Image: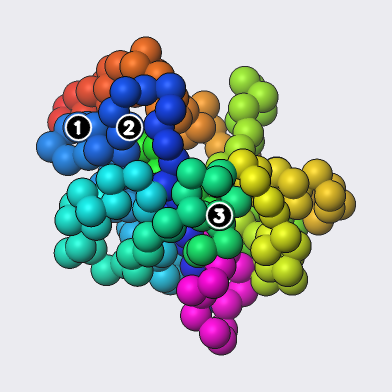
Amino acid sequence: MIVAVILAAGLSSRMKKNKLLLPLGKTTVIEHVVKTVLSSKVDYVIVVSGRDHEFVHKLLKYYPIRLLYNDQYENGQSTSIIKGMETLPRTGIEGVLFAMGDQPLITVEGLNAIIDAFTMKKGKIIVPVNQETGKKGAPVLFEQSFFSEIRKIEGDQGGKVVIRQFPDAVFECEIQSSEFFDDIDTEEAYESIIELWRRHETIDET
């Protein structure tokens, strides 16, 4: 079983509004991420919210996911990671895929490539990368054997701590589109993602 933990509890400190609730197409940023993850080969999905959790839960309550509220979200990303780890199914888990709630341009194909690389045992930690641009990052898939290390992460840190600690366990999975890694940290980044989204929608319609 592959479990996805979507981290949706950030402060959005560089924007005056919660970036996850921003519109994108006919829905919102966080809904696009959830829908994409649900459409992939992931078996079980957990969403950890923080800021504006009432609105996030209202948006997502009809999706087949586990919704959690992290009341310690202001203390950094690690608290959301730990919250997600606390509620994993007790048995049958092979790995956990950590995804970010502000990356709405991730694709089903990209997520499945990560999962396939893990299933084929190419690595115990699967990190997506775009060789052309050098971009790499989330979502990252960790084998169950690293769960104890993940639970040790503290402060405003994420899985990179474990990745740096165990470089020999890492397999870099090639993702053809560099847009896969784009996140929303500023108004400019949001506008760029809207434009990219519109282009994809136009291509899909032709």
Residue marked by disc 2: 19
- Count neighbours of disc 2 (C-alpha within 10 A) and say few if under 14, some if 14 to 19, many if 20 or more: many
Q: Decide: marks 1, 3 in contact (CB < 8 A)?
A: no
Magenta span: predominant SS is loop
Name the image quarter holding the C terminus. Answer: top left
Picture coordinates of residue 164, whole percent (x, y): 80, 44
Picture coordinates of residue 103, whole percent (x, y): 42, 37
Observer able to see residue 154 = yes
Question: Outermost residue toward the bottom?
Answer: 91
Residue marked by disc 3: 79
Which amino acid, mark 1? Pro
Residue marked by disc 1: 23
Estimate the spatial distance between the alpha carbons at disc 2 and disc 3, rounded to whole Å. Answer: 19 Å
Which residue is rendered at x = 17% and y = 40% of the image?
27
Which residue is rendered at x = 40% and y = 19% of the image?
186
> Which of 138/50 is in front?
50
* Left or right of 187 on screen, residue 142: right
Task: Please determine whether, in this image, residue 96 is positioned above or below residue 23.
Answer: below
Q: Which residues are magenta?
A: 85-97
SS assignment at label 3: helix
For marks 1 and 3, give the one nearer the viewer.
Answer: 3
Picture coordinates of residue 17, whole percent (x, y): 29, 28
Mark earlier in primary sequence (1, 3): 1
- Count neighbours of disc 3 (C-alpha within 10 A) and say few if under 14, some if 14 to 19, many if 20 or more: many
Mark earlier in primary sequence (2, 3): 2
Q: Where, by quadrant of the figure, is residue 190 drawn? A: top left
Estimate the spatial distance between the alpha carbons at disc 1 and disc 3, rounded to whole Å. Answer: 27 Å
Which amino acid, mark 2? Lys
* Left or right of 64 on screen, residue 87: right
Q: Is residue 68 magenta?
A: no
